[in-house]
Image (spheres, rainbow, N blue to C red):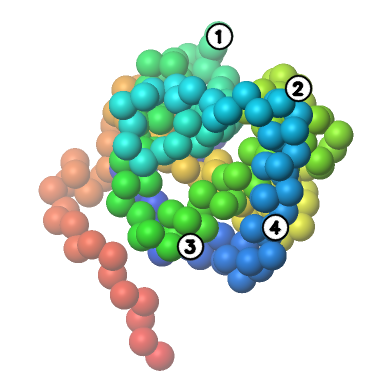
Amino acid sequence: MNHPDKQHLSSDQIAQQLGPYSRRRFLKGSVAVAMATSTVLTLGCGSPDPVQPDLKALSPTQQQLFARLTSVLLPTAGTTLFPVEQTPVLRNLDHLFEGLDEKVRGDLGGAIGLFEYGSLVLGGYFSRFSKLSDTDAVAYIESWQNGNSIQRGIITTLKKLVYASYWREESTWVAVDYDGPVSERWGIPSLGNAPLPAE
């Protein structure tokens, strides 16, 4: 169980997680190939419609990927967890994306594209991730978790983004008996990000 936390992922944290991807720019070619394959398979149907048209930073494709990833990673139906469909996960993600450095946002966008369209050629699904069935989506996620360092870095980052965007909502805390950060209850002032100790 992932414990809720009000901390937000920073550009530096995301950049560090995507380190292997950033160092291997050749992956852009893989994304281009996958996207070209998608275009052929969908017969030029154009870009997908956004899930929430009023969002500012997430593209329609990114919205659909995160909506699908959220439903697979957080199957709250039939549990005591707060319903994921009543939680503004996409809006929280959009707000986070708005605050990212331009380079980190670009690298993250490329990683998202690789994951979304990689399923067209990896595993023989012949479909974008956001259109996979629940069973295939879970299998695809697991294959990335057990894949090479680039795949592991990308899926770990995407999962952290989804979990952080769900658990940051106070409405989700009741089901896990979490009553907020200790620092707030005890009145401890925030010192921001403290530097690592020098040697």
Instruction: Kindly identify which residue carries mark 3.
Output: 15
The answer to whether mark 1 and mark 4 are in CB contact below 8 A is no
Answer with mark 1 or mark 3, whichever residue precedes in sequence: 3
Q: What residue type is labelled 3?
A: Ala
Q: What residue type is labelled 2?
A: Thr
Percent x, y of residue 78: 55, 9
The C terminus: image quadrant: bottom left
User: Which numbered circle lies on residue 29?
Assistant: 4
What residue is rendered at 35% in x and 55% in y? 100
Q: Which of marks 2 and 1 is in front?
A: 2
7 displayed left or right of 109: left
Percent x, y of residue 108: 51, 53
The answer to whether mark 2 and mark 4 are in CB contact below 8 A is no
Answer with mark 4 or mark 3, whichever residue precedes in sequence: 3
What residue is rendered at 36% in x and 41% in y? 57
| Residue at the limit of the structure toward the bottom, as seen here | 199
10 Å neighbourhood of mark 3: few (<14), some, or many (≥20)? many
* SS state under label 2: helix
Q: What residue type is labelled 4?
A: Gly
Answer with mark 2 or mark 4, whichever residue precedes in sequence: 4
* SS state under label 3: helix
Q: Which of marks 2 and 4 is in front?
A: 4
User: Which numbered circle lies on residue 78?
Assistant: 1
Q: In which quarter of the image is residue 143?
A: top right
